Each structure stands twice: as C-alpha cells, then as structure tokens.
Amino acid sequence: MENNVLAQKIFELVGGTDNINSVTHCITRLRFMLKDDTKANTEAIEALDVLGVQVQGGQYQVIIGQNVGKVYRALLKAHPDLEGSPDSKESATTKKSIFANVTGTLSSILVAALPPIVGGGMLKGLTFFFTNYGIIDSEGQLATILNITGDCMFYFFPFLLAVSAAKKFKTNEYMALALAGALMYPSIISGAQEGLAPLKLFGFLSMPYIDYSSSVIPIILSVWALKYVYGFLQERMPDMLTTIFTPVLTLLIMVPLQFSLIAPLGYYGGNYVAVGIEWLITTAPWLAGFFIGATRPLLVIVGMHHAIRPIQYQQIATFGYTTITPANFLSTMASAMATLATWILLKDKKQKQIAGSSAFSAFLGITEPALYGVLTKYKAAMVGAMLGGGLGGMIATAMGGKAYASAMPSILTIPVFMGGGAASIIIGLVVTLTVSFLLTIVLGKTVFKMDGITITDGKNGSLEPNVTAGVVLSPVAGRITALAEVSDQTFAKKLLGEGVAIQPSKGEILSPVNGTITALFETNHAIGITCENGLELLIHVGIDTVKLNGTHFEAFCQVGQKVSVGQMLVRFDQKAIEAAGYDATVMLVVTNSGDYLSILPEFESGNVYPGEKVLTVVD
C-alpha cells in the first residue's frame, strides 16, 4: 500500500482531526494522543498494512515498522495542521542558538560513547606512569597488552562515534559504521603514514590520504550528511528496490564525498591553524602561547592539534628546544584542574566518578576522557580550562619557557622543561592551576549552575523539586536490579522499553518526575506518566498483579492530573501481595526509549532510595 494512502486511511480510522490532539513517531510506531481512544477503529487499522495497534501510556500507537518515517511525513504532508502539535520538540520560545545546538549535539554524541573512553583513558594514564618509572618494562609483553587495551577505543574512535551519531541524527547505524570503516580502511591509514599523493577520482576529485584514527569531527559530519542522503534516496526509491539500491547509491555518493570534502575539513583547518601559530611565534610569542594554551582543548576535539606537531619537531631540530610544548603542557594541566574542580562541584554520583577518573587521567597526560566527558558537557569547566591554559601559556612563553625534548604533556614529564626558563614553567603552572580551578568553581556555582542534577541526599529520601530534563528518579525504596533479570519476559526482553527493576522495601510509589498522569490501570498496579520534556514512563508494580483486580492497591492520582517529584501516586501492601503468591518487583520503564539516543542506568545493583537518580536519558 502506498505510504500516502496508508497514512490517510490511518488518519481517518483514528477519528480524523476532530479526535487527534497530537501525533509523533518513534522508530517503529505512529504515536497518537487521541481525545477519545474508543472512536478509533482498531480492527480496521489492524487490517491495514501495519504490524499492530496498542494503547499504552495514554497513547494510541499504530505499529508501522521501519517505514514509519515515510508514513509520518505523508501524514503531515496531507494534514500540515498536525505538525504544530504539542509533541514538538521545541517551541518558538525555547529555540537555542546555533552554538548551543552544535555543542549540545556534540556533547550528547560523545557522552553516549564515553564508557570505553573513560576506561581507556584511565588505563593509558596508569600504563604511562608504570613505564615512565620503570615499574614495568616499556618494551615488554605486559606493556604491549596494556597499550593495546588502553589505545583500542581511541584508535577506533570513529566506529564508536558512528553509532552514537547515527542514533542522534536518527539514521541507519550500520550505514554509519560502513562510513567509519572507510575512514579506517588500511590503505587510507598506510597511505597517510607513507605520505602518498592524494587519490584522484575521475581525474579531478582529490581525496587525500589522512590518518583518521582517534578523530572526532570527520565521522560526525559524515553521519550528519548520511542522514540526508540516505533519507532522500529511501524516500524516493520504490519499495521493491529500496533494500538493495538505497544502500548502494548511498555508499557511492557518501564515500567519495566523505574523502574529498567532509572528512578533510579538520585536516585542512589544522594546516591553517599551524600556519597562523607559526606566524604568531615569530611576531608575538606571548600571543602564540595564549592561543595554544587556550584553544588546545578545542583543537584536540576537532583533531587539528596534530597539525602543530611538525612545528614542534622543527623547533627542536633547529634550536634544540620548542616553545610550543610548554603551552601544550599548561593547557593539559588546565583541563585536568578544571575537571578536578568539576568533581568537587558535582554531587551526582555517576558524573562525579567520571569527573574524578578523568581528572586523574588528564594529570597523567590523557585528556580525552576529560574533554569528552566533562569539558564538552559543562561550560564552566571548558571556560575555566581555556582561560587558565591561555594565561599560563602566555606567561610561560613570554618568560622564555622551553621544552628540551618532545614528550607527552604530563606531570610526569616536567623534567623536560628543567633547563633555561624553568622558572617560567613553575610560575605559569601556578597561574594555570589557580585560574582554572577558581574560575570553574565560580562559574559553576553562578553563571552556568553546573550542579543541576542533584536530586536527593540518598538516605532520608528528601527531594529537590527542580529536576533536570533527562533524569529519572527512583519511585520506590528497595534494591535495584537489571530489568533483564525479572521473570516477566515482556519486561526482561525490553519489549516495552529500557528501564530498571526494583525489589521494594516499602509499599509506596512516589512520582519520579514532574509530569502528567496519562494512564492509570483500573487495578491501580500500573501508572503511565508523560514528563514535561516528552519522556514517557511506565511504573508497573508486581508481576501478574493485574489478577488481584486492585486488591492491596490504593491510588492517590488520576488520569490527567499533574504531579511533581515525590508526590504519592500509589500505596500497596507488599506483604499481602507476596503472601498471595505474587512477585512485588516494581518495573520503571521508558516506553518511548526509541525516541532517545541512550537510556543509561545509574547502577545495576544495590540499595536505592526514593528520589535517588536511577536513569539518565540522553537525547
């Protein structure tokens, strides 16, 4: 059935404009908010070319499958008045600046790929420490294994980012991985190492050999472009041909475009930066020191810092020292100190752990976890690191700071600066650490309000009323467990969405978010809540407890009621439920998980208190 025909039939069968409050879609389903679900002709809809219908969380959901995007667009094209419905992600009054959108997008993509980066960064730092002090042989087999383990996620970073970028941009993850595979193809890497001349496609399209390992921006830009190319072809390709020819044409377009234009942007940009720095070193060394110290975090993120290395090597070969490494070193220390200040400010346990381990790695010279997990996420930390590094770099360079060997910028490599100009490094380091720390603390407490996700003190269940979007709290006291471990396979297989399970110790369900009650089963054992930011939650008390017909349950809310964090929703008699032979485990599920980049559990086991954060939702 044609997409436009299917869309029109669904529109008519759910009751048309008179019965539709809003409509959106996720990966597989059209999600209608209907005025009256009973007016929808479910049997007739299920007879169409759809996978099924379900009413859940206050939504009337028509399950389409992977073709849902086309059907949704056809629906809006025929009925454009639905496009301005309340499900819109952002209203005109909440539009963000281009810079805020770019940094927010970059941060969310990096955060989703963060776990291996944090682990690898910590391991690289420890390995450098052990080998630097001779605790283990730097040429031995143990060091080799440790280096492989610590480096692999950085070397193949484009693959990690391909997945998270595809989720963020809502395009095909496997096509995105294919583009990452092209960037990391052995012939490209070896060609870059050998300095081969660029490939020429059709005699004029230049595709330079560049080592894209550890790069960030090339794959993100490529996946962003993939979204439009793949979507354009998928939209226009006949259904009979799209499975084969859409991927083929997408790759034929995207791979040359990626190699000739999109991916080299960072490389060419880095060359221009290097030329500018070389000019600054000649005309105003102090300004060069400030620029290098202040911008290094940004240059590392976009991969342009590699272009500066040849200047360092040339300085050492010509003069026996380099004036660039001191600024790099102080910038690294600034990133580490700003991350440490962030660790002090944060009260959220998981974010605090990330900041703490990232600061440790950064002091040892591995800044990627700090950059991707802290600086890109918290503006106070980024500003603190940039200004602290810039001022320290300016002072060290102006006072004649030098490095007499090429070395990783780390607290362990301070001896390379201990020649002429050593005092400049010491003074610059004091300024860098002081400015980075104080500026991050002050900005984090005032301008940027860094700690916006502190919800509870954990032990007495006291709740803060102002909850950051994307954070879901525990609705009940008890012991948390992975959703996959519950005996109900619908929840264990996550058919309803991502979430957690909690074995309760007290029979009270409190609201885990600010939102509206969109569903309350007549047995009072399950509640649907739509948050103020569009997040849809299901709180389900017990397994098969629907058979109790409401016995042992008492509701304190109703459909349509607005609720706030900590508000009583349901009280249940846990002992009576278990005595009747039922499992009283509470399931907390994000039913529109497909609309988000990632649903991250705070922890998978241990005691949990009402109001303690259990889920972070990354958009």
Image (spheres, helix red, strand yellow):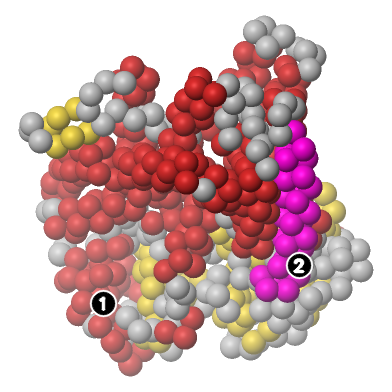
The amino acid type of the residue labelled 1 equals Leu
Work out how far the residue at label 1 is from the one at label 2, CA to CA, in angstroms: 47 Å
- Quarter the N terminus occupies: bottom left
Report if residue 314 lies within the magenta region: no
Q: Position of residue 434 (x, y in %)?
A: 78, 54
Q: Quadrant of residue 247?
A: top left
- Visible residue check, residue 534: yes
Residue 352 seen in render: no
In terms of image quadrants, where is residue 364? top right
Mark 1 or mark 2, earlier in chain: 1
- Queried whether the magenta region covers residue 442, the answer comes back as yes
Crowd around label 1: few <14 · some 14–19 · many ≥20 (10 Å): some
Q: Which residues are magenta?
A: 422-449
- 612 with respect to 8 (left or right): right
Q: Amino acid at mark 2?
A: Val
Q: Residue at x 86, y 63 (%)?
A: 458
Indicate whether 139 appears above or below 102.
above
Q: Which residue is disc 2 drawn over?
A: 442
Residue 575 location, quadrant? bottom right
Q: Which mark is residue 76?
A: 1
> Where residue 60 sits: x, y (%)?
43, 75
